[in-house]
Image (tube, grey):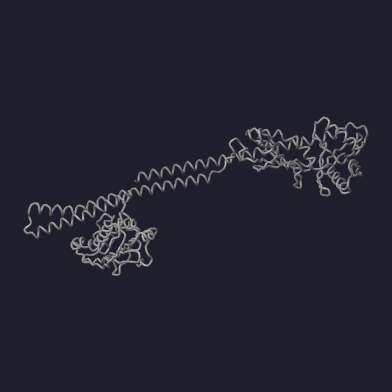
């Protein structure tokens, strides 16, 4: 037993250590995957910022290129820049930006000239104040062009400009155009991010760019200028028809969840715009081939609890088996001791009769009576053991009939009287006749004998054991009272279990420990009830109720051995 418990404890310790190692590994993998994702997004954001700056510079260089070839000192802005717009559309060599308004003004504070769509007074004032200030305070000498961002009358606007100075070192002119901020962001962002999508799309065959990498152009005030709405994911739905199948193409938006995100500023040359790169997915397994490692803390904790429960259950089962083995040994020892006494008596007086050592007929009759008495006692012990064995194997099938318990109890008391006389116990009967009950006669005899033997065993010498049989409305009641110490309240249910014997403060506690268990089992099989309570004179009062008819048995069968509240007196 201690060895098995030790092995179970060692097994649990090994399982706990393995669970801890697995949990630590899972956490390390999760941290590694998190760092890898953050590094990837940071790398993608930095690369995207450089490429976006290059894309903006390419678009502005292509749009402002015709100004370098102009022969006039101050050519008209609309015609020159429009020529660059048309060139970009024809060659497709740069992002196609669609200006809505063109402007030009002489440095340092000339009045701006506009062409193109109508320009509101608010937009004129914004360009007049903002462009001049930006050229004077922000623009660096090595900048060929620059961007401005502003919200005019609730509409986000992007203004691009370049400075052209004549050869005679005059202040020069500022040329530029104004366009919608969202249109400008889409124009410079759309051709760029495909190359970055390849890095993550190669991670898993089922991943697509639309559901992994998202790049946003963010204004200084936080508004998203481009990239905020994911492109729809193409879906194909099969529609069964008669004789063939058809496929209906459709589109469904990607339900993206952000895993990692980073932001990179494009700098003051490009209107302090920011580029946001987010790693998003509708499937967490798209981050890597095997998915994002997650914490298995709850699963491991559940396994440990399960393992602990199994270890505890195994230990309890081992303890139960150990206890059953001890009880079986006690039963064997008790039965052997109980059988040895009557067998010794039978052998002694049988040899006395066989050797004719008796001196008179009276002695021969007394020896024969002792042999018969001890044989009955031996038979009672064997019947108890057989009943206990058959009950556990479900081999008992009592055959019930209506019996007068008063008459049967008197016969049992007459047969038990010699045993009571030997133990110096007086038997007193209080029997109401008739008291019919539906019971097997042999089983009832065993019930009464077990209760009488229990009263004699645990009561003091010279006591009076009272046996009462009374008739109730639908049942008959047997009560056996002794003058012993009684049964404590805490033990009044426990004593009906097999192999339980109360020994504290009692004499003569030898026995098999199955007598009361047999009483409870036989009573329950007849649809009755059995319980113990305090007797009027302080001892124990064992009560058995048996139904008087089949209808009463069916009514009481659901109650089993329930203790009536009216009889639960202390």
Judge whether residue 491 can be spotted in this image. no
Q: Residue at x 14, y 58 (%)?
A: 369
**Residue 551 falls in which quadrant of the image?**
bottom left
Judge whether residue 188 can be spotted in this image. yes
Q: Quadrant of the C terminus?
A: bottom left
In this view, the residue in front, 552 or 308, is 552
**Residue 80 falls in which quadrant of the image?**
top right
Image coords of residue 66 (percent x, y) = 87, 32
Q: Is residue 474 depicted above or below 161 in this figure?
A: below
Image coords of residue 554 (percent x, y) = 38, 58
Q: Is residue 288 depicted above or below 429 in this figure?
A: above
Q: Residue at x 34, y 46 (%)?
A: 1
Q: Residue at x 41, y 48 (%)?
A: 313
Query: How many marks do you count on the picture?
Result: 0
Q: Is residue 475 depicted above or below 167 in this figure?
A: below
Compared across the picture, whether 41 is left or right of 421 comes to right
**Residue 465 falls in which quadrant of the image?**
bottom left
Image coords of residue 26 (percent x, y) = 54, 41
Extreme residue toward the top, this view: 91
Extreme residue toward the right, this view: 72
Image coords of residue 447 (percent x, y) = 28, 58
In this view, the residue in front, 378 or 226, is 378
Compared across the picture, whether 2 is left or right of 253 comes to left
């Amino acid at each position: 037993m201690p060895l098995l418990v030790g092995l179970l404890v060692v097994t649990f310790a090994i399982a706990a250590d393995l669970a801890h190692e697995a949990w630590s590994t899972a956490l390390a993998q999760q941290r590694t995957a998190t760092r890898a994702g953050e590094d990837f997004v940071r790398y993608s954001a930095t690369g995207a910022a450089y490429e976006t700056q290059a894309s903006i510079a390419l678009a502005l260089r292509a749009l402002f290129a015709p100004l370098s070839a102009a022969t006039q000192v101050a050519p008209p802005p609309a015609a020159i820049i429009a020529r660059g717009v048309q060139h970009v559309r024809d060659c497709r060599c740069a992002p196609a930006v669609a200006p809505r308004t063109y402007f030009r003004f002489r440095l340092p504070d000339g009045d701006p000239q506009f062409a193109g769509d109508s320009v509101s007074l608010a937009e004129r004032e914004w360009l007049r104040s903002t462009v001049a200030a930006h050229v004077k305070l922000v623009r660096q000498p090595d900048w060929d062009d620059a961007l401005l961002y502003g919200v005019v009358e609730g509409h986000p606007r992007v203004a691009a400009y370049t400075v052209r100075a004549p050869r005679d070192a005059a202040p020069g002119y500022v040329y530029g155009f104004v366009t919608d901020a969202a249109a400008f962001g889409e124009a410079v962002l759309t051709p760029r991010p495909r190359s970055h999508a390849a890095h993550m799309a190669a991670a898993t065959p089922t991943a697509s760019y639309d559901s992994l990498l998202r790049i946003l152009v963010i204004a200084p005030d936080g508004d998203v200028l481009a990239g905020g709405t994911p492109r729809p994911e193409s879906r194909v739905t099969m529609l069964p028809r008669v004789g063939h199948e058809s496929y209906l193409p459709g589109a469904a938006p990607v339900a993206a969840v952000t895993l990692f995100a980073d932001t990179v500023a494009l700098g003051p040359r490009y209107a302090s715009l920011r580029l946001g790169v987010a790693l998003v997915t509708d499937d967490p397994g798209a981050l890597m081939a095997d998915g994002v490692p997650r914490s298995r803390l709850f699963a491991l904790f559940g396994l440990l609890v399960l393992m602990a429960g199994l270890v505890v259950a195994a230990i309890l089962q081992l303890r139960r088996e150990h206890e059953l083995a001890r009880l079986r040994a006690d039963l064997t020892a008790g039965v052997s001791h109980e059988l040895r006494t009557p067998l010794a008596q039978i052998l002694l007086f049988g040899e006395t009769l066989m050797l004719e050592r008796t001196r008179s007929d009276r002695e021969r009759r007394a020896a024969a009576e002792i042999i018969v008495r001890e044989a009955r006692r031996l038979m009672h012990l064997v019947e108890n053991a057989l009943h206990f064995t058959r009950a556990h194997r479900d081999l008992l099938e009592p055959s019930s009939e209506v019996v007068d318990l008063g008459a049967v109890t008197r016969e049992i008391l007459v047969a038990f009287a010699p045993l009571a006389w030997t133990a110096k116990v007086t038997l007193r009967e209080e029997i109401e006749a008739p008291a019919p009950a539906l019971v097997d006669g042999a089983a009832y005899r065993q019930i009464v004998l077990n209760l009488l033997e229990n009263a004699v065993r645990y009561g003091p010498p010279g006591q009076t054991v009272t046996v009462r049989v009374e008739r109730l409305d639908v049942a008959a009641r047997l009560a056996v009272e002794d003058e012993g110490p009684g049964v404590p309240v805490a033990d009044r249910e426990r004593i009906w279990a097999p192999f339980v014997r109360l020994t504290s403060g009692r004499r003569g506690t030898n026995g098999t420990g199955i007598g009361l268990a047999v009483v409870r089992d036989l009573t329950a099989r007849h649809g009755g009830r059995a319980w113990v309570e305090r007797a009027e004179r302080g001892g124990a009062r064992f009560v058995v109720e048996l139904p008087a008819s089949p209808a009463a048995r069916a009514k009481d069968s659901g109650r089993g051995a329930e203790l009536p509240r009216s009889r639960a007196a202390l």
